């Protein structure tokens, strides 16, 4: 069963929630998955912490450092994810992270483990497209894993077409220039033009908008231009000062999903 | 014919090292640079402007000085390539002059850079002042403390110095912050990387701009020794820009032994070292597949050296390839050995070297050069910026 396809076929305005594995405490990974899905998250994106996350802003950097200090690493994460499908049976789950820890773990064994625990897809932002196409794509297919690619306002039309053709999950529309969790409001009109330009391309792949979306207003606006949105840094910020991470996460999602 | 060590493949690989492992947000910038840098560098107008600036502004060619007392001390014939006499006090400006001209041709109106010891930051701030472009330099909070004179210089030159507060708060983190700035400012900004690191085409671009060092060496050696080729070329390696420049025109001359000198810090296996060729394993740092210091889970670890210009956890992919292929030999020098070399050069030749450069000088005792050998040490920078460190370590200097 292709859980990602299923989700996009059966629902609208999908909410993809990102959080960092092993944060705020090492064993929060699965309780958070359960809480987020229970409150209405449609897709989960679990961050594999890295020491040098180039595409991430200060909030996710901080959570990554904290998770590493808590003892998170890929063997620990895959240990926790053994119970992933018991906790969230239907929800598409993606792992997001940088290539270096995956390389050190071993690409093939990483893909095998991810498939084994029921992960549906991967976001590896620093994996070059050429290398994905030539070396990784066949391996992804072998293990039934889908790849999510990023698109920015500067991505050329030809490259978007190529990403669309290669993608079997969804395209991640980066909302504007900047790293995750950017606090400056992007130019709404320029952003609208960008979203509409992509929408008019009639791509085969569904689209989610991410970066800088923090609340219900941002989520609703994004849903007006795509199939849904991705929220990460705002949740991490909410988790920074809480004693009950799952309850805080659930309240966060409820506030966005309320009618 | 054996393939040249100088040229990476079309995708930026030197052997198994290099490439461009970058998030999509950086792709348009890096791609623009990749598709245009060779044409721009080859353009006669660009070259004319570059050569004029290198001569009249940087002060090139830099002298090749025969260091007679140092030669006597080591029982071989030592020449010093005086990059320390470049404007701003180090080789770094060879690259920044070239890149600022490149940035102008790309239509960029804002410049960013990272810096460790502050030499690259100063060299970038300098050319930005010259060209009237705004300049932001990222520098680790720790480095800001230990390289205060260079911070003051950058500010005097009109640059904004931004503190990198994450991680070890040194060069690696400053580079992360510069890359994040570039992600946030993808249209108007050019990122002047200071070393032969980062995604393709940066390692090749910076190596080509620093290659003037070895180009001059060949002509100067011919005049002074009767041969363009020395027996040894010695240079220190953090990321490896001065070594790349000093090695470049000798890379395909197998009779020339290339000695890359890394910082061992307190000792290679002390847990406080930056000897990447020994302690590093293949992985990805700052968009390049190269040797880097990392733990078993692929988290990049914090290097250590007393020298702020050498404590980078990776080396440029060219150097990783030179090491793996055996073309270059790697030597490690501790903090204390480097400090000794500082006082030695100061007293024997009247030249106070930068702490980074002192690592290369210290290797003179380890390379086994004989009386008939010609050894060129790339004197990459002068020691003014390190005076505070030298004062704190006077007991080790004498």
Image (cartoon, rainbow, N blue to C red):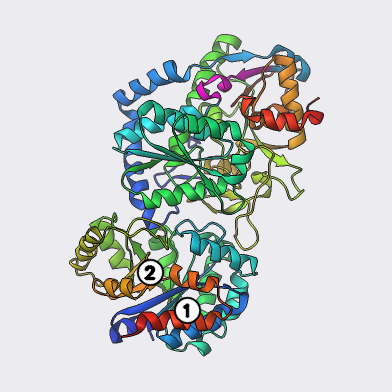
Question: Quick one: label 1, few (<14), some, or many (20+) residues within 10 Å?
Answer: many
Q: Disc 1 sits on a residue from what chain?
A: A
- Where residue B73 sits, quadrant-wise, is top right
Q: Which residue is mark 1?
A: A119
**Residue B285, position as x, y percentages in the image:** 53, 51
Q: Which residues are magenta?
A: B78-89
Please state which of residues B18 and A39 is positioned toward the viewer in this rendering: A39
Question: Which numbered circle lies on residue B97?
Answer: none
| B147 on left or right of A229 | right
Residue B83 lies in magenta, yes or no? yes
Question: Is residue B375 shown above or below B136?
Answer: above
Q: Residue at x 54, y 32 (%)?
A: B152
| A79 on left or right of B131 | right
Spatial separation of the CA atoms under disc 2 and disc 1: 13 Å
Label 2 sits on a secondary structure element that is loop
| A85 on left or right of B371 | left
Q: Disc 2 sits on a residue from what chain?
A: A
Q: Residue at x 24, y 71 (%)?
A: A225
**Residue A152, position as x, y percentages in the image:** 32, 59
**Residue B323, position as x, y percentages in the image:** 61, 41
Mark earlier in primary sequence (2, 1): 1
């Amino acid at each position: 069963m292709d859980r990602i396809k299923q989700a996009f076929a059966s629902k609208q305005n999908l909410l993809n929630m990102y959080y960092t594995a092993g944060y705020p405490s090492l064993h929060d990974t699965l309780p958070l998955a359960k809480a987020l899905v229970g409150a209405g998250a449609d897709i989960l994106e679990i961050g594999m912490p890295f020491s040098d996350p180039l595409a991430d802003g200060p909030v996710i950097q901080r959570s990554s450092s904290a998770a590493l200090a808590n003892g998170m690493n890929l063997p620990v994460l895959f240990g926790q994810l053994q119970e992933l499908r018991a906790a969230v049976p239907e929800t598409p789950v993606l792992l997001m992270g940088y290539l270096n820890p995956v390389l050190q773990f071993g690409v093939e064994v990483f893909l095998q483990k991810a498939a084994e625990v029921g992960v549906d897809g991967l976001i590896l932002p620093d994996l070059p497209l050429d290398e994905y196409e030539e070396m990784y794509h066949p391996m992804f297919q072998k293990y039934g894993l889908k790849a999510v690619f990023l698109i920015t306002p500067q991505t050329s039309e030809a490259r978007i077409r190529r990403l669309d053709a290669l993608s079997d999950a969804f395209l991640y529309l980066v909302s504007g220039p900047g790293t995750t969790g950017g606090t400056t409001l992007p130019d709404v009109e320029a952003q609208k033009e960008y979203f509409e330009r992509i929408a008019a391309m009639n791509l085969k792949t569904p689209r989610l908008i991410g970066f800088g979306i923090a609340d219900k207003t941002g989520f609703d606006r994004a849903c007006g231009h795509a199939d849904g949105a991705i929220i990460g840094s705002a949740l991490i910020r909410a988790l920074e000062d809480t004693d009950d991470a799952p309850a805080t996460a659930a309240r966060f999602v409820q506030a966005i999903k309320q009618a | 014919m054996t393939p040249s060590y100088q040229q990476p493949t079309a995708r930026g690989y030197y052997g198994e090292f290099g490439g461009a492992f970058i998030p999509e947000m950086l792709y348009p910038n890096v791609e623009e640079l990749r598709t245009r840098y060779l044409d721009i560098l080859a353009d006669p107008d660009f070259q004319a402007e570059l050569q004029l600036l290198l001569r009249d502004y940087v002060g090139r060619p830099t002298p090749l000085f025969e260091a007679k007392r140092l030669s006597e001390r080591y029982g071989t014939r030592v020449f010093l390539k005086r990059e320390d006499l470049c404007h701003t006090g180090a080789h770094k400006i060879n690259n920044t002059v070239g890149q600022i001209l490149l940035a102008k041709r790309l239509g960029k109106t804002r410049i960013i850079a990272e810096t460790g010891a502050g030499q690259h930051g100063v060299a970038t701030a300098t050319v930005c002042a010259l060209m009237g472009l705004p300049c932001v330099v990222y520098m680790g909070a720790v480095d800001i403390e230990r390289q205060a004179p260079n911070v003051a210089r950058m500010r005097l030159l009109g640059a904004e110095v931004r503190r990198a507060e994450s991680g070890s708060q040194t060069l690696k983190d400053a580079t992360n912050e510069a890359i994040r700035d570039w992600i946030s400012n993808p249209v108007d900004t050019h990122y002047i990387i200071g070393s032969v690191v980062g995604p393709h085409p940066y390692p090749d671009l910076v190596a080509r701009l620093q290659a003037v060092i070895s180009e001059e060496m060949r002509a100067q050696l011919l005049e002074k020794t009767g041969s363009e080729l020395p027996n040894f070329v010695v240079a220190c390696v953090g990321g490896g820009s001065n070594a790349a420049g000093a090695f470049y025109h000798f890379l395909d001359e197998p009779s020339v032994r290339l000695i890359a000198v890394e910082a061992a810090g307190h000792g290679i296996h002390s847990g406080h070292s930056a000897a990447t060729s020994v302690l590093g394993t293949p992985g990805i740092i700052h968009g390049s597949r190269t040797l880097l210091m990392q733990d078993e889970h692929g988290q990049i670890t914090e290097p250590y050296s007393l020298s702020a210009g050498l404590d980078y956890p990776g080396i440029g992919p060219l150097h990783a390839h030179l090491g793996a292929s055996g073309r270059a030999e790697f030597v490690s020098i501790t903090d204390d050995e480097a400090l000794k070399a500082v006082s030695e050069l100061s007293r024997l030749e009247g030249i106070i070297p930068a702490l980074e450069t002192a690592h290369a000088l210290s290797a003179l005792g380890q390379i086994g050069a004989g009386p008939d050998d010609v050894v060129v040490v790339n004197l990459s920078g002068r020691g003014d910026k390190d005076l505070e460190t030298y004062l704190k370590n006077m007991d080790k200097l004498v």
